[in-house]
Image (cartoon, rainbow, N blue to C red):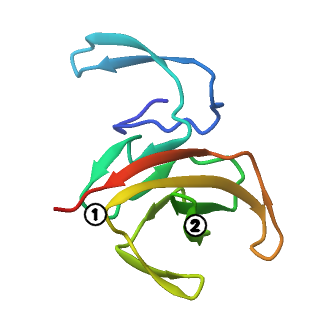
Amino acid sequence: YSGKGRRLVDKRVRAGARYWYQVKLFDRAGNVSSRTLAVRPAVGILMPAPGAVLRGAPLVRWAPVRKARFYNLQLWRGKQKLLTIWPNEPLLRLEDTWRFGGKRQRLTNGAYRVYVWPAFGTLAQPRYGARVGQVKFVVRRR
């Protein structure tokens, strides 16, 4: 990469692999500064952090899966599924209240789990890939 950009997004990396990037900076006088970085691509659910204690509804963010057309996200509290939704992007802001299964649901104090799967095909005929990940978090309002 060469240019004035402040970040690089490498879309050809594979999960679990290790990559080395050499970054060189040139100033107007021709001086060079160089650094080599070892990087592993982010995988799984990135937000919220595992075991996070939150005061409200979290933003759930996960590593994108190549060629996924959408995702299946499920929210559970104990053995009860509270939400199934199919976002198009690898992130979703949960709400304090929502409807699921014909009932009004509410994010209350307690422990929750989020699961995410990539989906291929269409909503009418989805094909799901291996689970992206799962994360547990706690909601503790005052």
**In percent of the image, x 58 and y 61: which residue is there?**
73
**In percent of the image, x 45 and y 30: which residue is there?**
2
Please state which of residues 16 and 141 is positioned toward the viewer in this rendering: 141
Where residue 15 sits in the image (x, y, percent)? 63, 31
Reply above or below: 81 against 98.
Answer: above
Please state which of residues 14 and 25 is positioned toward the viewer in this rendering: 14
SS type, badge 2: strand
Query: Residue 34 shows which numbered tag?
Result: none
Circle 2 Cα neighbour tier, 10 Å, few/some/many (<14 / 14–19 / ≥20): some
Total labels: the figure holds 2
Please, what is the three-letter code of the amino acid marked with disc 1?
Gly
Where residue 84 sits in the image (x, y, percent)? 60, 69
Q: In the rendered view, does 81 fall on the left or right side of 125?
A: left
Which marked residue is nearer to the observer: mark 2 or mark 1?
A: 2
Dividing the picture into quarters, in which one does residue 87 lie? Answer: bottom right
Query: Pointer 1: what residue?
Result: 56
Query: Pointer 2: what residue?
Result: 81
Where residue 95 sits in the image (x, y, percent)? 38, 72
Separation of disc 2 and disc 1 at Cα?
19 Å
Where residue 131 sits in the image (x, y, percent)? 67, 47
Please state which of residues 41 and 75 is positioned toward the viewer in this rendering: 75
> What quarter of the picture does the C terminus occupy?
bottom left
Dividing the picture into quarters, in which one does residue 54 lie? Answer: bottom left
Please, what is the three-letter code of the amino acid marked with disc 2?
Lys
Q: In the rendered view, does 89 fall on the left or right side of 141?
A: right
Please state which of residues 95 and 41 is positioned toward the viewer in this rendering: 95
Circle 1 Cα neighbour tier, 10 Å, few/some/many (<14 / 14–19 / ≥20): some
